[in-house]
Image (cartoon, rainbow, N blue to C red):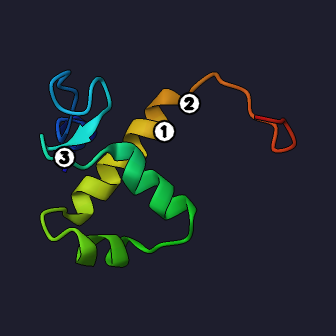
Amino acid sequence: MTASDLLSRITVRPEVLGHTPIIRDQLIAVEHVLVRLAAGDTVETILAEHPDLTAEDGQACLLLVHRSLPGSRFSPDQEQ
Protein backbone atom coordinates (compact mmCIF):
# COMPACT_ATOMS: atom_id res chain seq x y z
CA MET A 1 0.00 0.00 0.00
CA THR A 2 1.43 3.37 -0.98
CA ALA A 3 1.68 6.41 1.29
CA SER A 4 -1.06 8.04 -0.74
CA ASP A 5 -3.30 5.01 -0.25
CA LEU A 6 -2.67 5.09 3.50
CA LEU A 7 -3.34 8.81 3.81
CA SER A 8 -6.57 8.46 1.85
CA ARG A 9 -7.90 6.53 4.86
CA ILE A 10 -7.73 9.72 6.94
CA THR A 11 -10.62 12.11 6.45
CA VAL A 12 -11.80 15.38 7.94
CA ARG A 13 -15.50 16.08 7.93
CA PRO A 14 -16.65 19.11 9.94
CA GLU A 15 -19.96 17.40 10.75
CA VAL A 16 -18.09 14.42 12.27
CA LEU A 17 -15.95 15.42 15.28
CA GLY A 18 -15.45 18.95 13.99
CA HIS A 19 -12.19 19.30 12.07
CA THR A 20 -10.53 16.38 13.83
CA PRO A 21 -8.90 13.87 11.47
CA ILE A 22 -10.81 10.58 11.58
CA ILE A 23 -10.21 7.13 10.19
CA ARG A 24 -12.24 6.11 7.13
CA ASP A 25 -15.20 8.33 8.04
CA GLN A 26 -15.72 6.42 11.26
CA LEU A 27 -16.16 8.01 14.67
CA ILE A 28 -12.59 7.10 15.59
CA ALA A 29 -10.19 10.01 15.76
CA VAL A 30 -6.59 9.65 14.65
CA GLU A 31 -5.68 11.29 17.96
CA HIS A 32 -7.39 8.46 19.87
CA VAL A 33 -5.22 5.85 18.19
CA LEU A 34 -2.05 7.90 18.70
CA VAL A 35 -2.76 8.54 22.38
CA ARG A 36 -3.34 4.84 22.94
CA LEU A 37 -0.07 3.96 21.20
CA ALA A 38 1.79 6.62 23.18
CA ALA A 39 0.34 5.20 26.40
CA GLY A 40 1.86 1.83 25.56
CA ASP A 41 -1.07 -0.03 24.03
CA THR A 42 -0.17 -2.33 21.19
CA VAL A 43 -1.68 -2.13 17.75
CA GLU A 44 -3.15 -5.57 18.39
CA THR A 45 -4.94 -4.33 21.53
CA ILE A 46 -6.40 -1.35 19.69
CA LEU A 47 -7.52 -3.54 16.79
CA ALA A 48 -9.16 -6.01 19.17
CA GLU A 49 -11.13 -3.20 20.81
CA HIS A 50 -12.05 -1.59 17.48
CA PRO A 51 -12.79 -4.43 15.06
CA ASP A 52 -13.58 -1.99 12.24
CA LEU A 53 -9.97 -0.79 12.25
CA THR A 54 -7.15 -2.45 10.37
CA ALA A 55 -3.39 -2.46 10.77
CA GLU A 56 -3.26 -0.17 7.72
CA ASP A 57 -5.42 2.35 9.58
CA GLY A 58 -2.80 2.41 12.34
CA GLN A 59 -0.08 2.91 9.75
CA ALA A 60 -2.09 5.77 8.26
CA CYS A 61 -2.27 7.49 11.66
CA LEU A 62 1.48 7.24 12.12
CA LEU A 63 2.15 8.42 8.58
CA LEU A 64 -0.07 11.45 9.11
CA VAL A 65 1.96 12.43 12.17
CA HIS A 66 5.21 11.77 10.37
CA ARG A 67 4.17 14.00 7.48
CA SER A 68 3.24 16.79 9.88
CA LEU A 69 6.70 16.89 11.52
CA PRO A 70 9.22 17.78 8.79
CA GLY A 71 11.18 20.87 9.65
CA SER A 72 9.81 21.12 13.18
CA ARG A 73 12.16 21.13 16.11
CA PHE A 74 11.64 18.99 19.17
CA SER A 75 13.33 19.11 22.53
CA PRO A 76 12.31 16.39 24.96
CA ASP A 77 12.76 18.72 27.92
CA GLN A 78 10.51 21.50 26.59
CA GLU A 79 7.45 22.21 28.69
CA GLN A 80 3.99 22.00 27.22
Q: Earlier in the sequence, mark 3 or mark 1?
A: 3
Compute the Cα span from label 1 to label 2. 5 Å
Q: Circle 2 — which element? A: loop
- Tell me: 71 left or right of 76: left
Q: Residues within 10 Å of mark 2 (few under 14, many from 20)?
A: few
Q: Amino acid at mark 3?
A: Leu
Label of residue 20 in the image: none
Note whether 51 is above or below 20 in the view shown: below
Residue wearing tag 2: 69
Q: Nearer the viewer, mark 3 or mark 2?
A: 3
In this view, which residue lies farthest toward the right? 77
Q: Amino acid at mark 1?
A: His
Q: Are marks 1 and 2 in contact (CB under 8 Å)?
A: yes
Q: Amino acid at mark 2?
A: Leu
Q: Earlier in the sequence, mark 3 or mark 2?
A: 3
Where residue 40 sits in the image (x, y, percent)?
Answer: 55, 71
Residue wearing tag 1: 66
Tell me what residue is drawn at x 46 percent, y 62 percent: 36
Q: Residues within 10 Å of mark 1 (few under 14, many from 20)?
A: few
Residue 70 placement: quadrant: top right
Residue wearing tag 3: 27
Q: Circle 3 — which element? A: loop
Where residue 5 sits in the image (x, y, percent)?
Answer: 17, 40
Where residue 75 sits in the image (x, y, percent)?
Answer: 81, 37
Where residue 24 sits in the image (x, y, percent)?
Answer: 14, 44
- Tell me: 72 left or right of 6: right
Tell me what residue is drawn at x 15 percent, y 24 percent: 15
Q: Residues within 10 Å of mark 3 (few under 14, many from 20)?
A: few
- Tell me: 34 left or right of 25: right
Q: Nearer the viewer, mark 3 or mark 1?
A: 3
Tell me what residue is drawn at x 37 percent, y 71 percent: 43
